[in-house]
Each structure stands twice: as C-alpha cells, then as structure tokens.
Image (cartoon, rainbow, N blue to C red):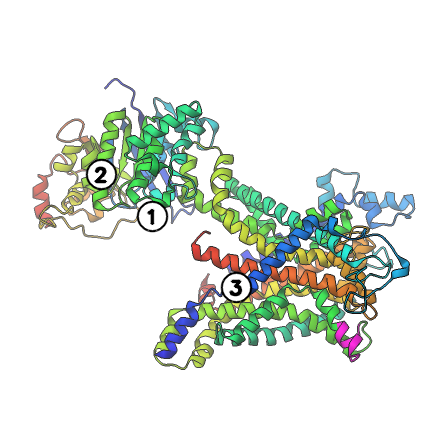
C-alpha cells in the first residue's frame, strides 16, 4: 500500500444551480482512491451523482471544493493546453455510443483521432495502431470503414472503447457503458471490458446502476446514495455481504434466477431529493432501521468485516445481520 | 369518419411539395443565370457602356426591333442584352459573395458564442437581437449614408444581412453537440477548439446552414436590387439588375422594355431560389439531415 | 412582473445598441464635425462643434458625451434645410402612416382570409394557387411590382395617377404595392399556423367526434392559431417600414422613406441618424405590443403572468 494511487479524490463537493433553495448537491463530500490496474464499480440509483463524480475525477468539470490528484499531482483546469495533453492518460466511455460518435466520419477515422490529437507518430504507425485497436475490440477493418449509423449498438460501443484506448490511457471512466445495449450484447461488451482490463492493465471506474454488470467486471465496488458514498469494499464482500441498509435494499431488488426475491426490501418514504437535504445520514428518511442518531449526525466511515470494507452507518457496531434487518423490513 | 380520414390525408401531405415541374424550371433558370453570371461578359455582343445616340430606345425583337439589338437599346443607345448580361453577372456575384460572407461571419460568431459563453455570448446574442429587430434596409441605408459606397463596402454591407440566423443556428447546434454529443466526446479526447468546431461541428451543421443560405440568397438579391434601384447601391459605370430597373423607370411610358426585362429577370431569380429553397428544406427534413 | 422587467431590459439594450451603432458608423465616417456640419462651415464653427461634442477627448469619453447628447434629446440639425432634424422627421411621419396603416389593415384582411382558405383545403388547386401567389408576392421586389402597376394603371389604362400626393387616389397604388408583400407573408404564416394546430390532438378529437370540419376550424383551430401569429407583428411592421422606403420612392410619396433616401444621397447625417432612432423606436414598440397581445391571447401566459 505504499504505491501512489492513480486517482485520489478528497472531500469532493459539486453543486448545480445558483439559487440557494434549488441548488442540487450532486456530489457531497466524496473521498475515493483508485489504484493502477484496478476496476472500481460505482453503483447507485440514477440521479445519485455517479456520473458527476466520474466527470469530476476526469477533470471534465471543476469541483466546488475538494481535490483530485492524478498520479500524485493535481489536474490542470479543464480546457487548458496542459489539461488537453493530460487527456492522453485518461479517457471516457459514454452511455450512448451513437451520440458520442460523429455521424459523418468513418469509425476508423474516429479511432485514429486521439492519435492525431496527441501526435502519436507517423502515418504508418497510426494506421497500424488503428488496425490493432479495431482488432482488439473485435471489429473488422471493413467495419472500420463504415459510418457509425451503419453499425449495431454493440459495435458502436466497441468503436468508442477502441477510441478511448487509442493512447493507452491509465484510467478509463465508463459511464453506464452497457445500459443502452440489449442483454446479450451487454454480456459480450462486459466480457470485452474484463479482457481489455487484464490485457492492458488500465484502471477502470465502471459506473452503472446494474449490480450484475458491476459484479462481472469490478475488483472493488462503491455504493453511492444522494451524492455520498455509503459503502465501499471488495466486490464480493459488498455485493454478497452488504452492511449498509441502502446497499442491502439495492441488492435485494435484483431479480435472481427465480424472478424477484420474495424477501426483497421495499424502500418506504419519499424518493430522494437532492435539493432538500435533511441533517444526519442522507438515507435515514427511508431507512427502516433508523435510530435517533441517524437524523442528527452524518455517520463516518468505519471498517466492517475487513479493513478494506468500509461502511458509513451508525448501526454498524450494534446492528444485526443483514438478514435480520431484511426480516424486520419485510 | 371519412371526413377524418380525408383530413388525415390532407395533414399527411405536410410539409407541402410543389410540383416538380416548377422545381425543374426553377433549377434550370438558376443554372442559366449562374452560367450567364460566369460567362455572360464574353457573350455580350457590345460593350455595356458603349453609347450610340443614333440608335436610342430601339424596341426588342418582336416589338419592332431588329436582331442588331435583340433586347433593344436604352435612352443612350446602349445595347440592353449586353447590359443585362453584365448586370446578371454583377448581381449574382454580389449576392453569392454576400451570402457566403454572411454565412461565414454568422457561423463564426455563433461558434464563438457557444464556445466562450458568459459576457461574450451575451454580447453576441444582444447583437443578434438588434439585427433581428431592425429592418435591414434601414441599417444598410444608414451605413451607406455614414460610410459612403464602394463595391467592397456594398458587398460587405449585404453580408451583414441574415448573419444573425446563421449565428443562432450555429450556436444552438454547437451547444447541443457540446453538452451531450460527439463534440463533448471529442473535447474530452483532448482536441483543440479549432478541431472540434471545424472538423466535427461544422460538417454536421452544414446541411442546415445551406438551407439557410438558400433563404438568405433571394433576400440579398432583393436588398441589392432595391438599393441599386434607389441609386444607392451599385454605382455607374458598373450596373446591376436593380440599377437597370431604376434607370428604366423614367422611360416607363415610352420604352417599358428597358424596365420590364431586368425586372422580370430579378423576380424570376428570387422566385426560383425561393422555390428551390423550400424544396431543399423539405428534402432535408425528410431525410433527417439537419 | 419579471416578464415585463425582462422585456423592458431587452428594449433598453436594443436602444443602447442602436445608439452605439450610430456612434460607431459616425466615427467611421471620418470627422463627425465635417459630417454633421457642412464642408463649407466656418473653421470656428467646426472648432466649437468639436469642443461641444468633445472630439478632443478619448473615445470612451466621446461615447459617453454622445450618449448624453442623444438621450438628452439633441438630435442635431438638418444640413439641407437648417431645421431641427427631429422636426424634419416628425412632419413626415403622418404622411407615411397614411399609406402604411391602410396597407397593414388590408393585408391582414386579405392575407389571413387567403391563408384560411388554403388551410381549409390543403393541397387543393386553390391552396396551390394561393401559395404560389404568396411566394410570388413575397419574392417579387416591391419596386418592380409598383412600376408594373404604374405601367398598367397609369400609362396604359390612365385611371390612376403615377406619383405625388395631391389627391387621395394618389395613395391607392402605394397602398396596394405595400400591402402585397405583407399579405403574402400573412397568408403563408396563417396557413402554416392553422395546419400545425389542426394536427393537434384536441382538433383531431373534435373531428373524430363528428364535429363538422369547418366548425372545428372556427371553434378550435383559429383561436389557437392566432397565438403564434401575433409574434409576426414585429416582422410585419419591419417589412412595412422597409417597403415604405422603396414604395415612397417609386411613387414620389413625400413620407419618411423618401426623406431617408434623399438624406442618404445627400449625406444629411443628422436626419439619417434621427430616422434610424425613429425606426428603432417603432420596432421596439411593435415588439412590445406583440408581446402584450401574446399575453392577452395565451391563457397560459396570462395565468402564470398574474403571480410571476
């Protein structure tokens, strides 16, 4: 653990909207580390601030407070020449590959673009690199000559991935990369991510609301609720033995082989609204096991089953097993 | 029920399609004008300024004239066919140049507004508002009064016509491309703004800009001919269709052909461009290339 | 309330830009002293002018002085007849209104009717005819149309005077010429607005319920189509002003447009500047009226405007 983390974020806060009453605190004090070659899955409902966190880590947007270090040094402000140069080291894969690609340019030209921008080498070297990239993501040279509109959704996402990998970045932020694809293609693309990850050693922040997708690719998983991370740890521990009540509810809602879990935890209360924030734990208005302290102070991170599995919940030391909590709620 | 179906059919026909015969005529006429604009000067049988006082006010062929001057002559005995060809060249040149300049200016300002945001964007939007509020002819007259006239000033002036439309379109499309689309993706690849706007956004908005140019072109032809008609546009010895009409108005009673020939040419040109523009817009809408 | 404030702020912004525009082109015209006064003005007059306008000051100071002078109501003196530029312009305004207002009224009557007729029978021969006529009316330059009318009614038929302003019959041809362009715009716009409304669910529902087609148009479609149509009022006024400049010169009608062209030709800058401000004021007023009418016609805006 002496190595410098690839990405280290401290106390990130990002608020949207200028008026105080309607301001949305999309990210509310997130501290996060991502090591080289590691895949961190970021889970949470839509609107919980996952995508914003991803954009903050990439330096696409500036945080209101807090800092992001990349390889031990802070990121340059977005739009500057230094920031543009740093893009060769970190890349993004988007949710909707069709809108992320220029509809008028052939796929190969777009895969080549980062090489041109970051002055990769001679024409011949670039040609070779593009061919390798297309091959690596499972596209043929003929498909590379087509326009984005002439490919399927999965093929387009492969093209976006090839483009993101062109400069051999250290970090890849994938924002819901499979949610626009159908189930079968999703599985293929997820396998591709895992394959690329082990082959190239790139670190991946994999943002998804789909827990099964996360489980398939992640080394570690962090769960976000209303702008804060509530639980974080090795993927197996978080997804199989969740300790935070929100994570437990989230996991119990995933349909299994036999359909919906009959003991699934149904969340009560109002849906989360990032504009009206209550004091204390963000989750307490909907938490079935909330105690008085939950409405008063924000819980700090504490190690759970292992030192690397951390949970922000007041109930942790005294709280019963997940199963017990599940029973009380059901 | 049948009424509703009929209505359905009526509505289904939108956007309207004009009979293709008229489109063909319009395209043919525009092609002819363009060719005459390019090569007309060399087809002209006489020098357009050559005066022949013995051969004044000759009517065109078919109205008592001879083939020496197929379209007749004006009050100074200048050959109208030659003047018409030179005028077409001048009008087409000015309108094309001004349309192109206006499109470039407006698109650049629109991109600048989308890129810079903040004060620069607000200033550009205020200018757009101003330009859209004021009748262009009045602004043009004011500038001509204050700055004076020359062919370069005149073309630059006409280029100011309609720039605000390109600016609006370019800004709107660039903003949406930046926030959610390909432009944002290319931006995070580390591309420079010049690359994003010129290599990616410009080709994507081109279709829409071209349709706007077909709308602006006939308007510029009208403003140019109007100003020239008023004697404030193209100055002699150069001549344009508008100044030919202005010239002919004093001989309306005695030699109406001096006026009718250039007037008909202008009207048909503007009408053709307008028809072709509508047709192009329909086609772009149908193919979704917008 | 917020809406009104925003509207006024925009109007002020436009006024500021118009004045700044005049300042910039005035500066570009060379020495404003020579431009506003005549070339033959005595040197002491030029000097006094330069000092009173602060031409020896930095540009920013000059700009502020200029703003103060203009907003103080001092619009300079006409070079051609030595009178106050404002007076020169003001006495021409009623003459122009005498042809523009009838043209506006007639074009609304004809244009809206034609548009409704076209929308009643979309893609019928009548519709195609009206729309082709509208395109023609929109694209044939007004000076060409005006001269053709002169050719037919004055030269060949000899029933209407070709120019001047001695008798009310002199106004007929200018009014018709002016009205054609606006009527064409209105016909196209009415048709488009109506057809758009006809495609909406409530109109489809009405006709599906068996309400007669024409009744549907009258009771459901027209009132709703009127809402977007109000917004082109500003455009129409602009079209009429630009049209008046050309038409008054075709028919020697001694209104504002003729004054403008004569002043531009003789570089009577004080008058041109005054006319520029007059047109800007008219356009701003027209747009504000359009906004108010829009608020009156659109119940949604009225409801939210009450408490906003």
Please give the label number shown on residue A275: 1
Q: Secondary structure at mark 2?
A: helix
The answer for how far apart the CA atoms under marks 3 and 1 are is 57 Å
Residue C242 in magenta stretch: no
State which quadrant residue C157 falls in.
bottom right
Please indicate whether residue B32 sits to the left or right of residue A316 in the image. right
Residue sitting nearer the eye, B274 or C264: B274
Chain identifier of the residue bearing label 2 in the image = A
Q: Secondary structure at mark 3?
A: helix
The magenta segment is C150-162
Please give the label number shown on residue A188: 2
> Are the residues under badges 3 and 1 in a single subunit?
no
Q: Residue at x 90, y 48 (%)?
A: C41
Please give the label number shown on residue B20: 3
The answer for how far apart the CA atoms under marks 3 and 2 are is 50 Å
Chain identifier of the residue bearing label 3 in the image = B
Question: Horizontal and vertical percent for residue B54?
Answer: 91, 60
Q: Secondary structure at mark 1?
A: loop
Vertically, is A220 above or below C101?
above
């Amino acid at each position: 653990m002496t190595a410098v983390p690839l990405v280290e974020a401290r106390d990130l806060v990002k608020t949207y909207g200028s008026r105080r009453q309607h301001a949305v605190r999309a990210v509310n004090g997130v501290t996060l580390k991502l090591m080289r070659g590691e895949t961190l899955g970021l889970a949470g409902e839509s609107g919980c601030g996952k995508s914003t966190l991803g954009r903050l880590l990439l330096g696409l947007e500036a945080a209101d407070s807090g800092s992001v270090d990349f390889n031990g040094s802070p990121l340059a402000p977005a739009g500057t020449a230094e920031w543009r140069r740093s893009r060769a080291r970190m890349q993004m894969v988007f949710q909707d590959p069709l809108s992320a690609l220029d509809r008028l340019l052939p796929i190969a030209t777009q895969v080549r673009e980062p090489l041109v921008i970051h002055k990769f080498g001679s024409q011949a070297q670039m040609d070779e690199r593009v061919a390798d990239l297309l091959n690596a993501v499972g596209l043929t040279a003929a498909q590379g000559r087509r326009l984005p509109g002439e490919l399927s959704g999965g093929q387009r996402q492969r093209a976006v991935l090839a483009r993101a990998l062109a400069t051999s970045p250290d970090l890849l932020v994938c924002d819901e990369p499979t949610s626009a694809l159908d189930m079968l293609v999703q599985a293929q693309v997820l396998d591709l991510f895992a394959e690329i990850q082990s082959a190239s050693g790139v670190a991946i922040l994999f943002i998804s609301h789909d827990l099964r997708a996360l489980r398939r690719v992640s080394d570690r998983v962090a769960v976000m609720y209303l702008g804060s991370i509530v639980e974080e740890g090795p993927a197996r521990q978080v997804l199989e033995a969740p300790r935070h009540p929100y994570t437990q509810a989230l996991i119990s809602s995933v349909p299994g082989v036999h359909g919906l879990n009959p003991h699934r935890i149904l969340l009560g209360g109002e849906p989360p609204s990032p504009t009206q924030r209550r004091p204390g734990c963000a989750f307490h208005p909907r938490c079935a096991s909330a105690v008085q302290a939950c409405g008063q102070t924000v819980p700090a991170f504490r190690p759970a089953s292992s030192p690397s599995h951390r949970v922000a919940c007041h109930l942790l030391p005294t709280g019963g097993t997940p199963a017990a909590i599940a029973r009380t709620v059901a | 029920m049948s009424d509703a179906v009929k209505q359905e059919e009526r509505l289904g026909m939108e956007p309207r399609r004009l009979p293709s015969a008229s489109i063909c005529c319009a395209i043919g006429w525009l092609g002819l004008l363009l060719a005459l604009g390019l090569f007309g000067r060399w087809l002209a049988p006489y020098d357009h300024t050559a005066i022949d006082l013995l051969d004044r006010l000759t009517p065109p062929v078919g109205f008592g004239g001879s083939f020496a001057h197929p379209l007749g002559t004006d009050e100074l005995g200048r050959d109208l066919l030659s003047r018409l060809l030179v005028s077409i060249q001048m009008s087409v040149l000015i309108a094309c140049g001004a349309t192109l300049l206006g499109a470039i200016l407006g698109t650049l300002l629109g991109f600048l507004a989308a890129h810079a945001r903040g004060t620069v964007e607000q200033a550009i939007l205020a200018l757009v508002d101003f330009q859209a509020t004021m009748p262009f002819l009045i602004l043009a007259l004011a500038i001509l009064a204050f700055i004076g006239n020359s062919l370069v000033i005149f073309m630059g002036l006409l280029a100011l016509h309609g720039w605000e439309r390109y600016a609006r379109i370019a800004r709107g499309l660039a903003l949406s491309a930046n926030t959610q689309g390909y432009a944002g993706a290319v931006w995070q690849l580390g591309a420079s703004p010049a690359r994003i706007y010129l290599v990616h956004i410009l080709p994507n908005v081109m279709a829409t800009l071209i349709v706007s140019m077909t709308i602006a072109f006939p308007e510029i032809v009208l403003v140019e001919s109007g100003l020239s008609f008023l004697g404030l546009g193209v100055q002699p010895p150069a001549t344009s269709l508008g100044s030919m009409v202005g010239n002919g108005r004093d001989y309306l009673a005695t030699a109406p052909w001096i006026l009718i020939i250039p007037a008909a040419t202008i009207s048909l040109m503007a009408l053709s461009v307008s028809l072709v523009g509508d047709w192009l817009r329909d086609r772009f809408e149908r193919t979704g290339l917008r | 309330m917020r809406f009104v404030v925003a509207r006024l702020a925009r109007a002020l912004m436009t006024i500021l830009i118009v004045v700044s525009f005049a300042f910039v082109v005035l500066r570009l015209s060379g020495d404003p002293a020579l431009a506003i006064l005549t070339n033959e003005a005595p040197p002491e007059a030029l000097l006094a002018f330069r000092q009173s306008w602060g031409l020896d000051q930095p540009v920013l100071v000059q700009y502020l002085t200029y703003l103060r002078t203009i907003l103080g109501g001092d619009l300079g003196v006409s070079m051609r007849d030595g009178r106050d530029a404002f007076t020169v312009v003001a006495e021409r305004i009623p003459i122009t209104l005498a042809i523009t207002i009838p043209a506006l009224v007639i074009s609304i009557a004809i244009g809206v009717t034609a548009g409704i007729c076209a929308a009643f029978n979309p893609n019928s021969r009548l519709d195609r005819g009206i729309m082709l006529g509208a395109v023609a009316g929109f694209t044939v330059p007004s000076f060409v149309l005006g001269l053709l009318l002169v050719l037919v009614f004055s030269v060949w038929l000899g029933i209407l005077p070709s120019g001047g302003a001695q008798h009310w019959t002199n106004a007929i041809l200018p009014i018709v010429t002016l009205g054609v362009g606006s009527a064409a715009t209105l016909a196209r716009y009415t048709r488009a607005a109506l057809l758009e409304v006809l495609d909406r669910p409530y109109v489809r529902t009405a006709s599906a319920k068996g309400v007669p087609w024409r009744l549907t148009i009258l009771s459901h479609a027209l009132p709703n189509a009127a809402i977007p149509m109000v917004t082109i009022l500003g455009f129409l006024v602009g079209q009429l002003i630009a049209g008046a400049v050309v038409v008054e010169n075709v028919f020697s009608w001694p209104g504002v447009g003729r004054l403008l062209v004569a002043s531009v030709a003789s570089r009577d800058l004080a008058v041109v500047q005054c006319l520029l401000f007059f047109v800007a004021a008219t356009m701003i007023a027209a747009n504000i009226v359009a906004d108010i009418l829009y608020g009156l016609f659109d119940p949604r805006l009225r409801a939210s405007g009450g408490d906003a």
